[in-house]
Image: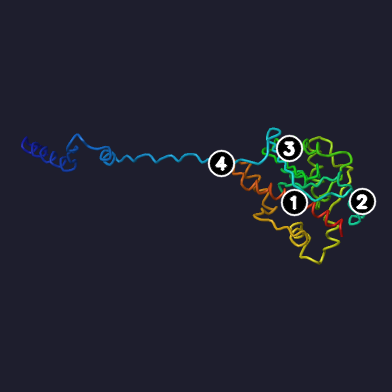
Amino acid sequence: MSLTLDKLQKLKRQAGGDIAQREPALTTPRTAQTSIDQLRQLLRIRAPAPVAAPVATDRALPGIEIAPGLHLREQTLPDDALPERFCGAFDRKDVLAPSRMLFFDTETTGLAGGTGTRAFMIGAADWHDGALRIRQLTMRTMAAETAMLDAFRAWIRPDTLLVSYNGKCYDAPLLATRYRLARKVNPLAGLAHVDLLYPTRRRYRGVYENCRLATIERQVLRIVREDDLPGSEAPAAWLSFLRGGSAQNLRRVLAHNHQDVISLSRLLRHLSAQ
């Protein structure tokens, strides 16, 4: 079908009208003094969110760093006068010399033992210059284990008398494993060892609900701990610190270990006097 000139012109006018209806004319701001906020709203641009300042993490531990990643805390505590000898009948021994004693306790990554468990803290106490000296070694990094083992070995003499609570079955074998894995001589091997758990059980089994050190502290030694971190939470406190977390709970582990070795000295005095 042929289209006349008049029809073509009419179709063009109709097409132009449709386009005008579909595409409204662009508008511009009424004035050139549009504010920044109005421009952002017009252009739909959001202001960037403020960046929070980094929060400083509490990483402080009491004491000094004596090797890369190894912390030493040393304190002295006034104590009662020492006898020349303690009666060792409670452990089926004649006498015990206080000058030879080293009370020790470890904090570890677990209770299962074996090569996968390591001690990240070693606490020790001895009588020195008329006071009870408490020394604690804490690993700030995994790589500090060798330095910690060397430092602990320096505290031990050939005639040292080890004193612990369940140390014969747990602490001493665990440290022996760590020395062996580090290819070092175990300084605890062959030393006399008084494990206070066994005489405590013989004397107080059935008297109290159990013979855990915390129970004996409370019932026998009249020691009440405040804000004590349970030993079961010590591994998590250390692992959190290793991953860059706060040192708050690790300091509580230090306080727990500190009291442990003090309590060992008090318990030995108590048992030897009975």
Q: Identify the residue shown where x is 77% and y is 53%.
A: 263
Question: For mark 2, does the 10 Å Cα neighbourhood hold few (<14), some (14 to 19), or many (20 or more) residues?
Answer: some
Q: Amino acid at mark 4?
A: Thr
What is the basis of the colouring in this image? rainbow
Question: For mark 3, does the 10 Å Cα neighbourhood hold few (<14), some (14 to 19), or many (20 or more) residues?
Answer: many
Residue under label 3, please give it.
145
Residue under label 2, please give it.
95
Q: Amino acid at mark 3?
A: Glu
Q: Quadrant of residue 16?
A: top left
Direction left: furthest residue? 6
Whole-angstrom CA distance, mark 3 to mark 2, is: 35 Å
Q: Is residue 187 left or right of residue 48?
A: right
Residue under label 4, please give it.
57
Direction front: furthest residue? 81
Work out whether mark 4 precedes mark 1 in sequence or the reverse, and give the earlier one.
4
| Numbered disc total | 4
Could you say which is closer to the camera, residue 99 or residue 178? 99
Work out whether mark 3 precedes mark 2 in sequence or the reverse, and give the earlier one.
2
Picture coordinates of residue 257 (x, y %)?
Answer: 72, 48
Q: Amino acid at mark 2?
A: Val
Question: For mark 1, does the 10 Å Cα neighbourhood hold few (<14), some (14 to 19), or many (20 or more) residues?
Answer: many
Work out whether mark 1 precedes mark 2 in sequence or the reverse, and give the earlier one.
2
